[in-house]
Amino acid sequence: MTATIVFCVTGWVLGWVVFGRPRVLAAGIEPVAHAPAAATPAGLQRAIIIPARNEAGSLGGLLMDLTADRAATRTPLIIVVDDHSTDQTASIANAVDGVVVVGAPDLPIGWTGKSWACWNGVAAAQRLLGLTTDEGGDLQLVFIDADVRMAPGALDVVTGQQRNIGGLLSVQPHHVAVRPYERLSALFNVIAIMGVGAGHSSPPTGAFGPVLATTFADYQRVGGHQSVRTDVAEDVALAQRYQDAGLTVNIRLGADLINFRMYPKGVRGLLEGWTKNFCAGALSTRYPTLAATVLWVTALGSATLGLVDGIAGQSLLLHAGIYMAFVAQLAVLLHRVGRFRWWTSVLYPVGLVTFFGVFVRSTWRTLVRRSTRWSGRTIDLTQRAAAFESELT
């Protein structure tokens, strides 16, 4: 019993350490060393690129946010890239004044759908703004997922901070869980923050794809989405390209300014989404961080089993105290990443079982079957290895 208590206490402490103190997206200019000189807002162009595949249920909200909030720096271009949707996605976008709808060409072999849509969105921005590859250094690109919602002024904050710190700015939106099953993503969100090292001063090992801001010049410098065309977790891979090029990657939490619902279409979408991202994220995590995170997750399970033993008559108060310590910890961490009901942390074992199930499923599909599914497409993971080998030869 003593060893179990020590293990749980160690895991609890590591949970705080590994999560760290992620920075929150907030208005105001952050002083950053090595930051490039900022362009004046009046002379800065921005292109908003929204890849959308069957997003009729959510796209309208984002477009309403972007077009209603005519921010301090007027956005000259909002591009929705319709990725072969079979619903009313294109019609909804076409009905909004000031929005340009571009149909993605047929998906080439070796590309994932989102990277292809983003790449074509940038190409459309070049055409519409009359830019060549060597021009447009002041142009900011902001990639936003269709299910994101933005508070008034949020876009200005994103582009202002990117302009100040340079490189790639990634924002993880505040997770708003509406339906009960959506709370199954709670633990995943905490682990995702831990995995990339968002709460520490060292450079993160990845990025979050819902909101990405960069300059056209830096995007071209790293090869853009073409350089990560075979990667399932294109956000993680793109962050690595920026760091390889000597550019900074910064992560912010959306907090009160940017939020989203995760996988609102049902449990199947939730399982497919986390299965797709899980292994790629884990493989990019630093080994000490990965080990500490695994220990923390295991301690969560150990505390749960201890509570079961306590209910069976073995040191109930002690085991209940350990369990409630993890409940309190999760309540604090979940408040940082999303909006969840109080009982989400109390019933964390349900999310933990889901987590382990997705871990097994993701490992099987990624490392054994070498394929995964997302948005109605089967993604062949062997293409990444083939593309990597071709680049080496």
Image: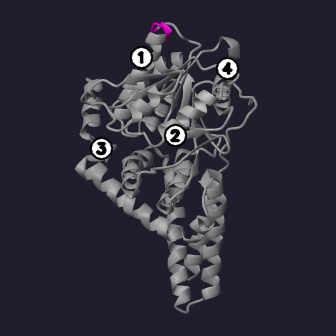
Say which residue appears at 68% left-offset and 48% top-offset.
21
Q: Which residue is mark 1?
A: 123
Residue type highlighted by circle 3: Gly
Instruction: Give the mark toward the camera: 4 or 2.
Output: 4
N-term-proximal mark, 4 vs 2: 4
N-term-proximal mark, 2 vs 1: 1
Numbered circle sitting on residue 376: 3
Q: Which residue is mark 4?
A: 73
Instruction: Give the mark toward the camera: 1 or 4.
Output: 4
N-term-proximal mark, 1 vs 4: 4
Q: Say which element carries label 2.
A: loop
N-term-proximal mark, 1 vs 3: 1
Q: Which residue is mark 2?
A: 208
Percent position of residue 287, x then y: 48, 49
Residue type highlighted by circle 2: Phe
Q: Say which element carries label 4.
A: loop
- Region in magenta: 129-133
Cα gap from disc 1 to disc 4, whole angstroms: 22 Å
Position of the N terminus, as image quadrant, is bottom right
Near mark 1 (Cα within 10 A), the count class, few <14, some 14-19 or many ≥20, is some
Q: Say which element carries label 1.
A: helix
Q: Is residue 26 above or below residue 247?
A: below
Cα gap from disc 1 to disc 3, whole angstroms: 25 Å
Percent position of residue 273, x then y: 40, 49
Percent position of residue 61, x then y: 54, 38
